[in-house]
Amino acid sequence: MLSGHNDERRTQNYEPCLKLYDLHVGSLPHLIFAVKNTLITLVSLLASNAAASPRIDSNSIADRHDMLLLQGAGDFESAVLTWPWPLGRKATDTGPASESSNSGYESARERFAYTYQVASELGWRPTEASLALASDTLPFPSFGSQPRQQFEASLSQAWLSEWFAGNISLNYSDNPPDRDEFRLDGSYLAVALGNWSFGIDQVDRWWGPGWDGSLILSNNARPVPALSLTRISPYIFDYKWLKWVGPWTLNTFTGQLDNDEGDRPGSDARLFGMRIDFSPFGWNNLDIGLSRTAQWAGDRRPGDLSTFWRLLIGEDNRVNGVTFENEPGNQLAGIDYRLRIPGWNVAQYAQLTGEDEETYLPDANMILAGVETWGELDAQKATWRAYFEWADTRAGYIRRDPRPDRDFNTAYNHGIYRSGYRRKGRAIGHAMDGDGVMRSIGVFIVQENGNLWGAKYRNYSLNRDGRGPNSVTIDPAEGSSIEGFFELDLNEFSIFNLQSSNIRVTGGLHYIDQENQGNGESDPDFGGHLSIVTSF
């Protein structure tokens, strides 16, 4: 187990693994408070064997499942609440197998160690090609890989050096609603300085413990082109009055929404996001995340540093001199956690996200909560997980100034940014958009070879009052869906004289039955999706 309480032990745990990510350069407080050592620290940063960490993205349920198993077993100390998740945070022990080498847990450990080893190799990666097909109607996007359009294709090339990591991904989407047929979604370029990764990217971000949604940042909308800063490894503060925070990480970005709102103030706003994850007192049974995002600037809106500063300190309510003309922006903020019950294979998680602010705390909150359990099938060396999740995107919870008339038509909407908290017509937060409620039950099994098979049932109500802007439906709607899904890694084979080094197939079948509450019409649908990714 990697322990931030003991630097010597931490170093020993990293030594058996690839030293590519062995970033013992001190923590950020040294750079801030130890002025006399600033030059020495900077020199050590530049001289260290740094690497821009590759990452685990939010496109694999099996990878996330393995990470949670390893965290519970004490293989690493890092909250598993935020994606992309830099692999540099932990080089798992690649030494002799443990006593549980025949268990599903050991299979997960071996898969993650292999993922780390492959991702850590310097140089050019094999070229990756993908193809995705989908029916006209798809269930709400959740954690994992789902195409956004009926036909998508991409070609990607990645590389890794001691200083830089990058991926150029060229995408084509047939007849998309936003008319952007050619895209760079999934591309990034990052440079590592010590324990920090600076980058420019356009990647999916998922913030929070939910499996079927996130109230503040999910993979529902297309990724935002952004500048980003990420703390790679979750070292503990050296200062005694901050050690209680435990291992912590920081993710922040600022990007461009490029929403076309026409010739009006607020069009093409920027999007700022900041998130801190930590495990207080080093207790790996509890992960906590603090998130904040904000739309600001845009056409004919203030976008200087003083405006950004007032946005950071929360001076964006129309009081004390703040008017429509100088209001900094539209903010969301919240807290989430995942609590694993000691001695039991059970965890409870929740997310609270506020649309407004009152006395520097989130107000007009949306809520997501769930419970999950997991186990192993010894005979098959497989593991499984099941969860129940409930989410309500009506901004009417924990109001310090109760105003029921404002509960609806508030979430993801704003008076200045008329497109709301959306990009290209889709909510940046939960896929059902505002004023919805969803209940989900899911279960899946991960085999020894990493293949995943699962199913889920969802029941939901959308745009419940039928009055506010909503990207999913104009009228209120009630519906349910049943979905089967899979993630498969196939053996090597050659086609057209090209030797494939890896084939990954993801997909699913679904049945959706939804009724429009405005006209009483029912719209049942059966369909599916299939994605194939290979590298040459």
Image (cartoon, rainbow, N blue to C red):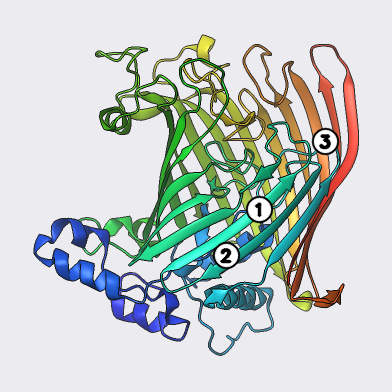
Mark toward the viewer: 1 or 3: 1
Q: CA distance from mark 3 to mark 2?
A: 31 Å
Q: Secondary structure at mark 2?
A: helix
Quadrant where the image shows the N terminus: bottom left
Q: Is residue 307 above or below residue 206?
A: above
Q: Quadrant of residue 249?
A: bottom left
Q: Name the residue nearer the viewer: 114 or 7.
A: 114
User: What crowding class fits label 3: few (fewer than 14 Cα within 10 Å), some (14-19), or many (20 or more)?
Assistant: some
Q: Nearer the viewer, residue 465 or 134?
A: 134
Q: Are circles 3 and 2 on residues that touch, CB within 8 Å?
A: no
Residue 166: % across, % down: 52, 62
Q: Earlier in the sequence, mark 3 or mark 2?
A: 2
Instruction: Give x and y (percent) for residue 462.
Output: 70, 24
Q: Is residue 218 left or right of residue 164?
A: right
| Category of crowding for the residue at label 2, using alpha-carbon neighbours closer than 10 angstroms: few (below 14), some (14–19), many (at least 20) | some
Per the model, the C-alpha gap separating discs 2 and 1 is 29 Å
Please determine whether, in this image, residue 242 is positioned above or below residue 461. Answer: below
- Which residue is denoted by mark 2 in the rendering? 67
The residue positioned 28% from the left and 70% from the top of the image is 46
Of the 4 image quadrants, the one containing the C terminus is bottom right
210 sits to left or right of 416: right
